[in-house]
Amino acid sequence: MDLSAIALQIAFMLREERLGRRRLAKRVGLGEMAVRLELDRLREAGLVHLDRAGCRLSPKGVRAFRPLLDPVRKLIPVDLAELRMDEAHVAAHLAMGLDGPSAWALRDAGIRAGATGLISLTRIEDEWAFSHNGEPIRAQNPRDAEQLSSRFPNPAPGDSLLLSAGPDLAMCTSGMWTVIRTLYEKP
């Protein structure tokens, strides 16, 4: 089954707790109909269970989503000052390096999904650095470097941090999940 960015976002939320459709739609930032259609697809594939108590991943869903979601340590909105690209930003801490597509290819995938920009960072020694050139972000962007260090404590060397921007939270989050999915696509 081809897993959409919406499916990944839904699975990420459902791996922690059972949620009702309305609450899930609100957290995803999409309309209830869009979330309902995706949940129906996931249910038909046996990846989620839907009942009066809410939605949850099925055992098959847990197995299917585990390789995609286990590296995602945290995904949260951030308020960037110096690296600001648009109105809304989300950051995802991935416990993995970006060995697949280039930083530019990832940015392009995010933009095609509705984001207006994407920055990929890598943990080098004790600070975040731009993935494409290894320059520490603290050198040019100390306020954002400080915020990211406090919001994403204790990363391991080689971990990645993706920053997605968009006109609203839904668009930058859609771009982020598309980028995460792209990391696992076969060339």
Image (cartoon, rainbow, N blue to C red):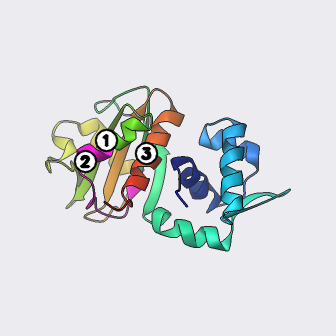
Question: Which of the 4 image quarters holds residue 187?
Answer: bottom left
* Residue shown at the point (61%, 43%) measured from the top left: 28
Instruction: Identify the mark nearer the N-term, 3 or 2.
Output: 2
Instruction: Identify the mark nearer the N-term, 1 or 3.
Output: 1
Q: CA distance from mark 3 to mark 2?
A: 13 Å
Q: Which residue is mark 2?
A: 103
Q: Are marks 2 and 1 in contact (CB under 8 Å)?
A: yes
Q: CA distance from mark 2 to mark 1?
A: 6 Å
Which label was assigned to residue 176? 3
Q: Are marks 3 and 2 in contact (CB under 8 Å)?
A: no
Query: Type of residue at label 1?
Result: Arg
Q: Name the quarter where the N terminus is drawn.
A: bottom right
Looking at the image, residue 122 sits to the left or right of residue 113; the answer is left
Looking at the image, residue 143 sits to the left or right of residue 116; the answer is left
Q: Secondary structure at mark 2?
A: helix
Where residue 167 appears, as percent x and y from the top left, is: 46, 26
| Residue closest to the eye, 44 or 39 | 44
* Residue shown at the point (25%, 63%) measured from the top left: 158
- Residue 36 within the segment the image draws in magenta: no
Q: Residue furthest right?
A: 52
| Residue closest to the eye, 70 or 178 | 178
Q: Secondary structure at mark 3?
A: helix
Looking at the image, residue 67 sits to the left or right of residue 63; the answer is left
* Residue shown at the point (44%, 38%) measured from the top left: 113
Residue 152 visible somewhere in the drawing: no
- Residue 98 within the segment the image draws in magenta: yes
**Highlighted magenta segment, given as a residue range:** 93-106
Query: Type of residue at label 3?
Result: Met
Q: Residues within 10 Å of mark 2 (few under 14, many from 20)?
A: some
Q: Which residue is mark 1?
A: 107
Q: Residues within 10 Å of mark 1 (few under 14, many from 20)?
A: many
